[in-house]
Amino acid sequence: MQQVGVTSHNHRPELCPSTTDEPPSPLDQRFVKLAHAVEATERRLLADERSLDDGLLEDAICRAYLQRFKNPDPPLGFRLPTVATLLAQGQAMLRPRRVVVAAQVQGINSTPDGASPANARITTGGVASPEDWTSSQVYAVRFWGIDIRPTEDRARRWTEELVWQHFVTGLASDLVSIGKIEKRFGKRMVDPHLVLVADREGEAFERLIVDILNNGALRARLAPLYEDFLEKTDLRVHVEGLQRQRGARVQVTMADHERRASAKRHEIRAPEEFVHLSPWTLAEALVAAPFSGLLPGDLGRDVYPALSVRGNSTEDLARSLRHMFRNCIRHPGEHPRGPVAQVPAAVQLLVQAFVGHEVRASTAALRAHEAERARQRPGEGRSAGRAGGTPEVPGLP
């Protein structure tokens, strides 16, 4: 039976393995041109030459560089390696995927190529069991090596344009984030080998959690790079009716024992304003669920058989959760939706219930701190300060 809050994945559209020696796609060719232009701009920035190849850079990326040009300081040593890493990640998202899922697109017949009509519908599974996809989902599953590819040429070109625009928007956002991080460091000496970008497994777990949360009533997204690096914020999560313009802050780790989870928590200023999600915190919540009311009815007990947990301790449950998550991440191509389809429904409900509860608790803590700061400094209100040092005010991302 399908549980409330979990999308059913019983129907599996046909998966077609894609060879890795396919000729360069139009996306590959566009990427090469853009990457050369970005690298040339970065080299000129190192030489204190602040100019753009407007004809080769996308508008969003031009705007990101124009914002960086306002900072008179030279680029810090970690900038160029970080940009190179981001380009490599982008190229991996754009190149031909190893799993191809046939798709159909409706609603673009009357529009010119490159348009993005609001009523366009991307589906997989054929007429009998259609499954809808948003453009952001089509782009996101490429991380897992999955290509949602329309069978009709014009629809395929239209979908590739959506994929390209998601890539460009993300790269522009990351370039802006690098500029903000440089500005925060100012003229201080910084290790040129400083790593700003999460490793593959860390990002994979964050993306899996986003997919799990978006399967229910919550709305989650990856946090911008500068929030991830400077403010220990991996995700932003919205709960309907909760006044959080940018969403609640969530830190995600694979910690499966108390000491590691506690150490990560203590790295954060005002940790009570964050949701701390890890196999350990999920296990703690599940063990307490019969008394806390976190999960309704018998749903809490459903997690144990779904994980084949050996033992009843928090440690046993945390290890089982970590093993299950890592196993799903390591075998992502079993379903068009990626590894989220392999996470048991009971575990997805646990994650959704835990995050929803903790978002409300962290928001209550945030509001209490804001009220206290307002009493101490009358007139400043909510913009008086944030856990990460960034005011939560309209207009900020």
Image (cartoon, rainbow, N blue to C red):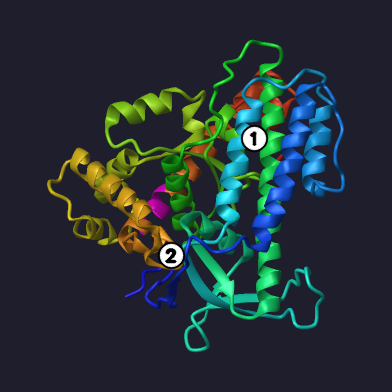
From the viewer's side, name the closer residue of 363 and 71.
71
Residue at the image position 51 percent from the left and 25 percent from the top: 270
Q: Amino acid at mark 2?
A: Gly
Check disc 2 and report the residue beneath it: 5
Residue at the image position 12 percent from the left and 46 percent from the top: 311
307 to the left or right of 81? left
Residue 396 image offset from top left, x and y in percent:
73, 39
Question: Circle 1 sits in a helix, a strand or a loop, which is it?
Answer: helix
Q: Is residue 377 magenta?
A: no
Residue 43 image offset from top left, x and y in percent:
75, 29
The quarter of the picture where the N terminus appears is: bottom left
Residue at the image position 39 percent from the left and 58 percent from the top: 332
Q: Image height check: is 344 above or below 285? A: below
Q: Amino acid at mark 1?
A: Val
Q: Does residue 392 appear in this view? A: no
From the viewer's side, name the closer residue of 319 and 125.
125
From the viewer's side, name the closer residue of 39 and 375.
39
From the viewer's side, name the closer residue of 51 and 323.
51
Are the residues flagged by discs 1 and 2 in contact, CB closer than 8 Å? no
The quadrant in which residue 313 appears is top left
Using a 10 Å C-alpha cutoff, classify the residue at mark 1 as few (fewer than 14 neighbours), some (14 to 19) or many (20 or more).
many
Q: Image height check: is 341 above or below 36? A: below
How far apart in space, not on screen, are marks 1 and 2 (Cα)? 38 Å
Question: Circle 2 sits in a helix, a strand or a loop, which is it?
Answer: loop
Residue 308 image offset from top left, x and y in percent:
17, 55
Q: Does residue 324 appear in this view? A: yes
Check disc 1 and report the residue beneath it: 83
Which range of residues does the magenta coloring cover? 349-354
127 to the left or right of 390? left
Q: Secondary structure of the magenta portion, mostly?
A: helix
Name the disc covering residue 211, or none: none
